[in-house]
Image: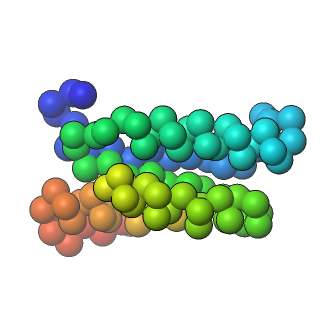
Amino acid sequence: LDESVDSVIACVEMGSVFSFSADEVTGVEELERITASIEKSKPSKPTSVVFRTTGDKIMDDYVREVRLRLLHSKIPVYSTVEAAILAHASIAGAGSYELS
């Protein structure tokens, strides 16, 4: 990992994953491969994941299912990029970082 990188936010666009999948089962399987890859990365820098759903029940259920699993790997899950950025700014000591 580049030493100039302070932290990593992985953003998973779940709607795109499902759009390129043949069906819902295949979409969930692909999400699981993506999640497993993030989980196995053993990051040395603060890392989090944003799962952006379309509000679909299957996607929302998947996020609820993996949230604790990733947290056990010290990878928090956020529902928005903004929330992840604010959390990472707080960790980095950026103080009162605000999004415009």
| Position of the N terminus by quadrant | top left
Foreground of the two, 65 or 53: 65
Which residue lies at the image location 21% right of the left edge and 27% below the top edge?
2
Residue 96 falls left or right of residue 35: left
Q: How many marks?
A: 0
Residue 80 place in picture, x, y as percent: 50, 62
Q: Is residue 8 visible?
A: yes
Coloring applied to the structure: rainbow
Asked if residue 29 lies left or right of residue 22, the reply is left
Tell me: residue 2, above or below residue 66: above
Q: Position of residue 65 (x, y in %)?
A: 59, 62
* Residue 94 falls in image quadrant: bottom left
Q: Quadrant of residue 71?
A: bottom left
Instruction: Say above or below: 96 vs 28.
Output: below
Rendered residue at 19%/61% (across/down): 91
As drawn, which residue projects farthest toward the right?
A: 23
4, above or below 28, in the image: above
Nearer to the camera, 52 or 62:
62
Residue found 15% across the figure and 30% down from its top: 3
Residue 81 visible in the picture: no
Q: Position of residue 10 (x, y in %)?
A: 44, 44
Residue 16: which quarter of the image? top right
| Image quadrant in which the C terminus is located | bottom left
60 to 31, vertically: above or below = below
Q: Is residue 68 left or right of residue 5?
A: right
